[in-house]
């Protein structure tokens, strides 16, 4: 008999996919404590997992497991293949906005200690028998957490395996890099953890999937990430150093760090709750849309390649684009005063006669007193000027 205790707070996210290969293994004796330590937001309280092997199987005890306040049961499903035991735990229902914690335990019969190399719970490694088991860095994986009943995403990679987190898996067998569209429907609208493993994952579009969490930290080859229109509150792209395109609008992000993404050319982080944005390291950035945010200022002095800029409907009151000499599209529908608009016009670049440049400053009645001729003499065209037929 072997007993292991692991703090999940110190655990490592590890993307591995497995499908059911042991029909004899079954989950039994699921028990849990009532809701305790109710909080409105996520707590710093560390959870802990005890793993105990017996002659009947493996006993799991998960302490301080986070659930929502309305939970009445804990669902446990698992897959087991090639020594990898993947377990998904989910409190149900999970509609309440407040959270609490429970201690849950259960037994998975028919799995012996000498058969298990590694165990994951909700994508987190909680047990590893062999220290020589392949490390995290040898896997290119993605973990998505969703509450949607129907999920679909597009991905470009080599060989791919998708574990949908409900005893269903899909796989491709491709010698090179291909683009694939995956779709899946769940029987109930509870939270599921989707684990994707693949070779050379370069592109992912997982937009509009009600994602509450997205982990792409292992994908250093990722070049394009579209994850717009999800309720994501955090997004870590610090290790995605090859990223050229990042679209994450219509989420609930309060911060976004793109300082490590020096190859970034197209960034859309609009319609979020951002109060600041540092793009000083993104010197090859061509397109930036950070409108519909709470930004109060924006330093563009390092973005000499910037061509298209949207900062509409922010709290910005002053903007200087003097360093952006190739800029040709600008939306600045903000509360800029007439004086601030005139200062902005003076920093606009001159446009060659053979090219076009467009600027949108919003409400004509509010801005008609500004000196538009400053911009027009530089070749800029105002898109918001009323038609002569109005």
Image (tube, rainbow, N blue to C red):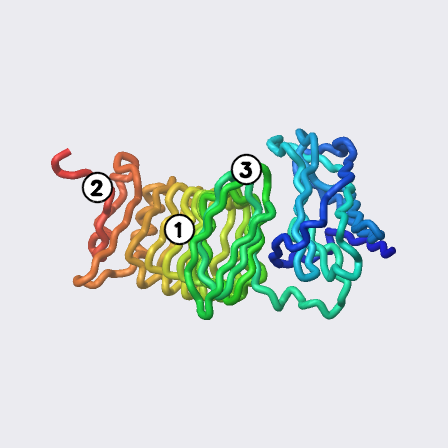
Numbered label attached to residue 272: none
Q: Position of residue 190 (x, y in %)?
A: 59, 37
Crowding at dot 2, Cα within 10 Å, few <14 / some 14-19 / many 20+, comes out as some
* Foreground disc of the pair 1, 3: 3
Q: Name the residue tied to disc 1.
A: 289
Q: Against 131, is 373 above or below?
A: above
Q: Name the residue tied to disc 2.
A: 385
Nearer to me, 6 or 233? 6
Name the residue located 69 percent from the left edge and 55 percent from the top edge.
85
Q: Position of residue 122 (x, y in %)?
A: 66, 49
- Position of the C terminus, as image quadrant, is top left
Name the residue located 73 percent from the left edge and 51 percent from the top edge.
8
- Position of the N terminus, as image quadrant, is bottom right
* Foreground disc of the pair 2, 3: 3
Q: Name the residue tied to disc 3.
A: 187
Is 257 positioned to the left or the right of 59 in the image?
A: left
Is 384 positioned to the left or the right of 101 in the image?
A: left
Image quadrant where residue 128 sits:
bottom right
Q: Position of residue 12 (x, y in %)?
A: 69, 58
Name the residue located 21 percent from the left edge and 52 percent from the top edge.
376
Q: Position of residue 356 (x, y in %)?
A: 21, 57
Q: Secondary structure under badge 3? A: loop
Q: Residue furthest left?
A: 389
């Amino acid at each position: 008999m072997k007993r292991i205790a692991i703090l999940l707070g110190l655990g490592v996210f590890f993307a591995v996919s497995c499908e059911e290969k042991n029909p004899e293994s079954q989950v039994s004796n699921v028990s849990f404590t009532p809701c305790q330590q109710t909080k409105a937001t996520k707590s710093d309280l560390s959870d802990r997992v005890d793993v105990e092997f017996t002659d009947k199987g493996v006993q799991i005890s998960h302490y301080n497991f986070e659930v929502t306040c309305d939970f009445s049961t804990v669902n446990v499903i698992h897959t087991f293949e090639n020594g990898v035991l993947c377990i998904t735990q989910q409190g149900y229902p999970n509609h309440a906005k407040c959270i609490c914690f429970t201690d849950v335990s259960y037994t998975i019969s028919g799995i012996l200690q000498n058969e298990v190399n590694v165990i994951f719970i909700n994508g987190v490694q909680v047990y590893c028998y062999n220290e020589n088991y392949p490390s995290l860095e040898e896997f290119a994986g993605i973990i998505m957490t969703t509450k949607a009943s129907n999920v679909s995403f597009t991905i470009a990679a080599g060989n791919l395996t998708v574990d949908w987190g409900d005893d269903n898996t899909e796989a491709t067998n491709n010698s090179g890099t291909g683009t694939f569209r995956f779709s899946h429907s769940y029987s109930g609208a509870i939270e599921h953890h989707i684990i994707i493993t693949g070779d050379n994952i370069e592109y992912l579009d997982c937009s509009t999937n009600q994602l509450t969490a997205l982990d792409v930290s292992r994908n250093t080859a990722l070049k394009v990430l579209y994850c717009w229109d999800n309720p994501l509150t955090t997004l870590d792209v610090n290790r995605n150093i090859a990223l050229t395109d990042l679209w994450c609008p219509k989420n609930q992000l309060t911060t976004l760090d793109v300082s490590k993404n020096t190859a970034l050319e197209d960034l859309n982080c609009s319609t979020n709750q951002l109060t600041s944005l540092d793009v000083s390291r993104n010197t090859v950035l061509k397109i930036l849309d950070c409108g519909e945010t709470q930004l109060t200022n924006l330093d563009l002095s390092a973005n000499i390649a910037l061509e298209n800029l949207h900062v509409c409907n922010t709290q910005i009151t002053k903007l200087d684009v003097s360093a952006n000499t190739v800029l040709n599209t600008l939306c600045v529908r903000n509360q800029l005063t007439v004086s601030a608009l005139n200062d902005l016009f003076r920093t606009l670049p001159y446009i060659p006669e053979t090219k076009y440049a467009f600027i949108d400053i919003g409400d004509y009645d509010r801005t008609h007193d500004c000196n538009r001729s400053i911009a027009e003499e530089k070749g800029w065209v105002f898109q918001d000027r009323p038609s002569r037929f109005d």
